[in-house]
């Protein structure tokens, strides 16, 4: 099958797999060994490529390519390149829209007595993938730099934290790792979309979105936001996709436990890049989880100004990760081609199954929400208003304040060829307050998005801004509330500040602070109030990913108006140090040590420490049953770099009391 | 609840159901009985309407309407109409977009001590339905005549047979029959779409399409085209929807056996009209079942010119029934509102489930196939080409003839206020061969429909037309092949005529005739060849619904061109006579007899005879274990008409050897 030669030409030589892997609409050559010389004028030889359990010519699952005397009609092109003795070199070009997957090869000899086939031989199986290098392919990308990042890069960065304090972690996509391609195809086979649609990237992406999560079908990953991950691996503990995909295959296609949004997005990115579809991971800071289908996220405050957890059913994710994939949308008008949102984190069902997308980013920006798939849901994630309600003692609620600029604050992805992030908010939204933004909202309404039905509220004449330092988990925190009176009269303000612990999904846990303040602010003046939050106050209540939410509800006496704001404070975890003995050279042993010291006055139990080096070492995992206060651990691994170039080593420490302590180093492997 | 008075105003008095039934955005009045006089200035009374298991104000499943001193904010409007002693008459108006279904009513009294509720009382439950009479409703219809036909008519006509011999049968929709409304709501509950989307007709229709068939979900009806219906009722034997819906409920929501397309369409029509969505049953003559997603239906002829049944996987349904529903498409640009196709016969899966639509009829006509749902599938049903292939002995196929005018020959539905049909083909397609038709095809291709990839073929210079008489099953048949030579030279033609038995789905059964002919036709002349088909030849091979398919494959010697045509001949079943003793008067007994004589020389076994009279009698069923050759049966039923006006009585005789022998009489019930 000339695997080595062909794979170089097809940009598939990085796959750790001995079989031939080719891309659509590009010729590959194979050698057919006959027991006598080939006669192109007389011999009637046919190559047959089969996929799936019931190959059918019309469905593109049974391909024939004739060589010799018969005229050829099929979709795949074939030609005799060279005849050398009994060996015939044949060039085969799969068509630009053909099914992707693993094909079986047969040679058939046609004589007057009938057709004779070669035996099945798994060594002549080969894989056909999407081809972002070919202008005829649905997933064609113009720039080599883009292909190198969105198809070929095996490592990526996923952003998390909070809008004011964007943090990141590396992720090992590992799309070329041994067994990963087979795992991806096995996952596709578990889906319901027939083979004949697997040449269509839109279908493959939609199927991928449904299959990543274990809901409905026997998908790959079980979502879990409960805080209890003792029956599996905590979502925060993974360092990359190959460990998950290989575990899925090893355990007989049983769903893997557990995932949250960045895990779903990280693994979907692997699936896409592995099959040849350009893909990237996106983080949306302050993402609405709109569970009622309108464009509002409702926050209900009780009589005291505290969040009423039982009535606040919607939630605002501090961040939410999804993917974008790049393709021509053959089913839509041309302008909706390009980047498409796809989200495999199970939130709502889309047309019966847990999936979301693909939906055109440019259609979201224009409010053109009629086209498939799930545009309304994505539009709500980035455009919802935050609506504050207050309930009286009878449970009757009234709207007190609307914040239309809170959601979709920043949408970011890794910059190509860099570890910095790129802010792509403007590809999803027109600027806040612009004419175009209003037009978009009108368009969205004409496409069935419910109109906002709250009445204009009394202007408070006062603005709130809540400031907080970036602190480490375990530090004390200083909170500042700036009250700006932009009216022409003095205002008398009473406010309630509530501090609670939240999950990254915005679901609130314990309320640890509740304070009443009141002040007078003169016309056109700004007053600042500060509040100290001690580590002692929040530490006992922390949940994973350590976010604190402060909410202010204020009431202006003069005009009976209300005003609210909130602020999420992300607590930085302690440091995880990665050290390398020497600058790494090909073929020479390198020793890496990862060091961690428990800075807290409590014991860390059931600690997992992972080291992952895409292309260097498979994921290494070490367990520590306990790390005492002040104690240090050191985990050393050694490896022999096999190839030149830029590499990444990442480490992740995770335990129930301390989640997602990560670090990564980038370095160059040089010649010895 | 003032059910009788309200139901008259709400066009719901025909429902045989004692509860109150109202339509959206129209006021109904109820009386609240207090134990003292009501004081509008001081009392704080709230009406609460709840639906589903977890009522939630934000989701529209928990509605409050205040009366008395509290200002009211909710979606439903309420007002005090009259106070008479301790009785308060309250007017309630559900909003135009509210959820449809069964609501529970509570009265709450709010005092300083808290809220006190009345107890649950099923007698105060009521149903809210769609409102085609209200311009604010999504399903509003302008003309009263349309509403009377598409919402209120309890009987309909479903067309079948063949394009040249359109036959029909009556169908009892029975949307107002006792228990039918509850059955429809029970079916909706079996679906996956949350209650909060049940105010949206688009969602309700899509859900209905999936639920009618038992695939995927525990839907209503099991599709069966096998010819063996011994484990249930044959699809041809049903006379209407109520029997099916009531059987479903009675048997604990177990799917009912069996259905084919007109049964699915008939029952879906009942579901729609029952919930208040205007709906009609459509028949498409020569309907493509495109199972490969392109616009071709491939017919493969073998070396001999006979249909190769193993290679001809696509099929052309002689007719196929679906539904149209009328609504504003809030999710699409305005011009795509109006009639929408919905098809509940399980053919292909749509986005994971067996369902199809709703899809805008006008979008199909324009080739604008990007919009949801399933436009491409419906477009293919009415626009596919028939492509004739011929295979050589090696199995290599070549296209020999393309017929682009065969499919979607006529699309018909019952004319409003008449028993005749209305041809609505022009609402789906521009005229064959017009410029607009070509533009539509271009638009469809730009929306992802595959381009037709066959090359132009040699013009044969000859046209075929195959004529046949309309005959009764058991008669001999004369077939005429007109060969028109429109070239300027004599042509020498050899042709093969094949006759086989087909199911209405176009699936071929036994080939009973195969004849070679050859002739010479002079330039610009027409030659006619006749062929006799004896009853003896086809009778032993008949399958249900008795269709014969004749296919001609011709070859012109002079230019080596091929030409093909086919013709379906529907055999009329014997007569079923319905007789009534006297002209029917309200309250007077009427005796009806249904007579049938077996005209064949074989025994009819396991015969079912149904009599159905919507609004007159529930479906009556009689079994005859055998009817000997020449023997007659007579089935008499008596009933007492209860209301004036036009009524329909229908009868249907069905057995494995003779399917769908139907008849109906229409008459006026007059005053005694």
Image: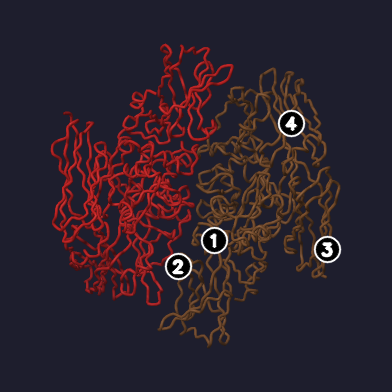
Chain colours: A red, B brown
Label 3 CA crowd tier, 10 Å (few <14, some 14–19, many 20+): some
Q: Which residue is mark 3?
A: B591
Q: Nearer the viewer, residue B139 or A543?
A: A543
**Residue B521 visible at all:** no
Percent position of residue A513, x then y: 24, 69
Viewer-side label of 4, 2 = 2
The chain letter under disc 1 is B
Pointer 3 and pointer 1 on the same chain: yes
Q: Which residue is mark 1?
A: B189
Pointer 4 and pointer 2 on the same chain: yes
Q: Which residue is mark 4?
A: B465
Q: Nearer the viewer, residue A33 or B282?
A: A33
CB atoms of marks 1 and 2 within 8 Å: no
Give the numbered dot on residue B56. Answer: 2
**Residue A254 visible at all:** yes
Secondary element at image label 4: strand
Relative placement, left or right, of A72 versus A425 is: right
Distance CA(mark 4)–CA(mark 3): 49 Å
């Amino acid at each position: 099958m000339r695997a080595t030669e062909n794979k170089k030409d097809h940009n598939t030589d990085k796959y750790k797999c001995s079989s031939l892997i080719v891309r659509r609409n590009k010729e590959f050559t194979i050698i057919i060994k006959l027991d006598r010389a080939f006669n192109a004028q007389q011999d009637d030889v046919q190559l047959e490529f089969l996929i799936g359990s019931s190959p059918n010519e019309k469905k593109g699952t049974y391909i024939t390519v004739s060589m010799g005397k018969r005229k050829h009609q099929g979709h795949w092109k074939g030609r005799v390149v060279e005849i050398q003795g009994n060996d015939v070199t044949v060039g085969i070009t799969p068509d630009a829209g053909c099914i992707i997957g693993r094909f079986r090869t047969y040679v058939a000899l046609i004589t007057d007595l009938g057709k004779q086939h070669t035996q099945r031989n798994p060594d002549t199986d080969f894989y056909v993938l999407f081809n972002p290098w070919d202008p005829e392919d649905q997933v064609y990308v113009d720039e080599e730099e883009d292909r190198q990042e969105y198809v070929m890069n095996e490592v990526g960065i996923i952003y998390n934290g909070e809008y004011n304090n964007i943090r990141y972690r590396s992720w090992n996509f590992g799309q070329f790792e041994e067994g990963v391609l087979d795992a991806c195809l096995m996952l596709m086979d578990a889906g319901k979309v027939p083979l004949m649609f697997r040449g269509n990237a839109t279908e493959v992406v939609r199927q991928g979105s449904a299959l990543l999560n274990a809901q409905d079908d026997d998908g790959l990953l079980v979502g879990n936001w409960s805080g209890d991950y003792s029956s599996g691996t905590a979502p925060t503990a993974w360092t990359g996709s190959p460990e998950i995909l290989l575990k899925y295959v090893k355990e007989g296609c049983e769903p893997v436990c557990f995932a949250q949004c960045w895990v779903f997005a990280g693994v979907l990115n692997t699936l896409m890049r592995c099959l040849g579809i350009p893909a990237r991971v996106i983080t949306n800071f302050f993402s609405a989880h709109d569970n009622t289908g309108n464009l509002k996220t409702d926050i209900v405050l009780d009589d005291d100004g505290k969040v009423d957890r039982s009535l606040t059913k919607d939630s605002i994710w501090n961040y939410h990760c999804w993917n974008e994939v790049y393709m021509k949308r053959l089913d839509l008008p041309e302008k909706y081609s390009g980047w498409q949102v796809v989200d495999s984190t199970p939130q709502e069902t889309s047309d019966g199954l847990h999936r979301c997308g693909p939906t055109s980013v440019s259609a979201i920006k224009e409010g053109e929400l009629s086209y498939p798939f799930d545009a309304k849901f994505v539009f709500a994630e980035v455009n919802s208003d935050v609506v504050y309600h207050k309930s009286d003692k009878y449970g009757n609620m009234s709207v007190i304040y609307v914040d239309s600029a809170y959601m979709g604050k920043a949408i970011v992805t890794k910059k190509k060829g860099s570890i910095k992030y790129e802010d792509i908010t403007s590809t999803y939204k027109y600027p806040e307050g612009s004419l175009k933004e209003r037009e978009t909202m009108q368009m969205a309404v004409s496409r069935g998005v419910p109109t906002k039905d709250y009445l204009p509220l009394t202007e408070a004449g006062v603005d709130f801004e809540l400031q907080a330092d970036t602190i480490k988990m375990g530090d004390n925190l200083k909170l500042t509330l700036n009250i700006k009176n932009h009216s022409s009269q003095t205002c008398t303000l009473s406010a309630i500040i509530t501090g609670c612990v939240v999950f990254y999904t915005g679901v609130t846990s314990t309320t640890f602070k509740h304070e009443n303040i009141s002040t007078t602010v003169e016309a056109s003046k700004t007053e600042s109030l500060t509040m100290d939050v001690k580590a002692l106050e929040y530490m006992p209540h922390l949940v994973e990913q350590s976010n604190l939410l402060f909410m202010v509800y204020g009431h202006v006496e003069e005009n009976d108006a209300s005003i609210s704001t909130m602020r999420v404070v992300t607590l930085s975890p302690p440091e995880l140090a990665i050290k390398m003995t020497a600058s790494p050279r090909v073929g020479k042993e390198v020793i890496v040590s990862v060091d961690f010291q428990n800075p807290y006055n409590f014991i860390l139990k059931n600690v997992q420490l992972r080291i992952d080096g895409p292309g260097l070492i498979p994921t290494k995992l070490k367990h520590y049953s306990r790390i005492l206060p002040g104690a240090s651990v050191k985990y050393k691994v050694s490896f022999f770099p096999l190839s030149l170039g830029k590499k990444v080593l990442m480490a992740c420490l995770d335990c129930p009391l301390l989640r997602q302590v990560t670090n990564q180093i980038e370095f160059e492997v040089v010649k010895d």
